[in-house]
Amino acid sequence: MKTRLLFFMFMAFSFAKAQVATFSAPSSYNITATSATISFQVTSSTTTTLYSQLATGNAGNVALAPLSGAGGSAAGTWVSPKNLTGLTPNTTYYFRYRCDNASGTS
């Protein structure tokens, strides 16, 4: 009588879920009476689209628009500068931004 040995191999795979993008608090520089540059760092493992808005008064009532130019959509760690021009002296401005990727919104 022959003896047969059967071997079974079970393999389990685990794929890390992409994380929601993170970003740093913005910093401002090149400030003049009518312009400024705001910059922040975004980190994401998947392609992330960055949205931004500049408003006076209530920043929550203005629709976010995709950020154009450098850093509009990418994966990895990147710095996104946003040049703000045409500002009015003695006016308070609110700059808001949001990152969206396959894992959600931050």
Image (spheres, rainbow, N blue to C red):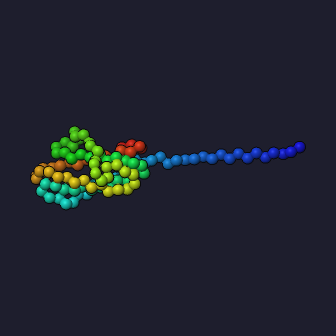
Q: Residue furthest right?
A: 1
Residue depicted at 16% across the width and 55% down the height: 35
Q: Position of residue 10 (x, y in %)?
A: 65, 46
Q: Is residue 17 visible?
A: yes
Q: Nearer the viewer, residue 57 or 88?
A: 88
Q: Position of residue 79 (x, y in %)?
A: 32, 57
Q: Decide if residue 11 is on the left or right side of residue 102.
A: right
Q: Decide if residue 82 is on the left or right side of residue 13.
A: left
Q: Nearer the viewer, residue 68 or 79?
A: 68
For the N terminus, the image quarter is top right
Q: Decide if residue 27 is on the left or right side of residue 20.
A: left
Residue depicted at 25% across the width and 53% down the height: 82
Which quadrant of the structure image shows residue 66? top left
Residue depicted at 34% across the width and 53% down the height: 42
Residue depicted at 38% across the width and 53% down the height: 43
Q: Position of residue 88 (x, y in %)?
A: 11, 50
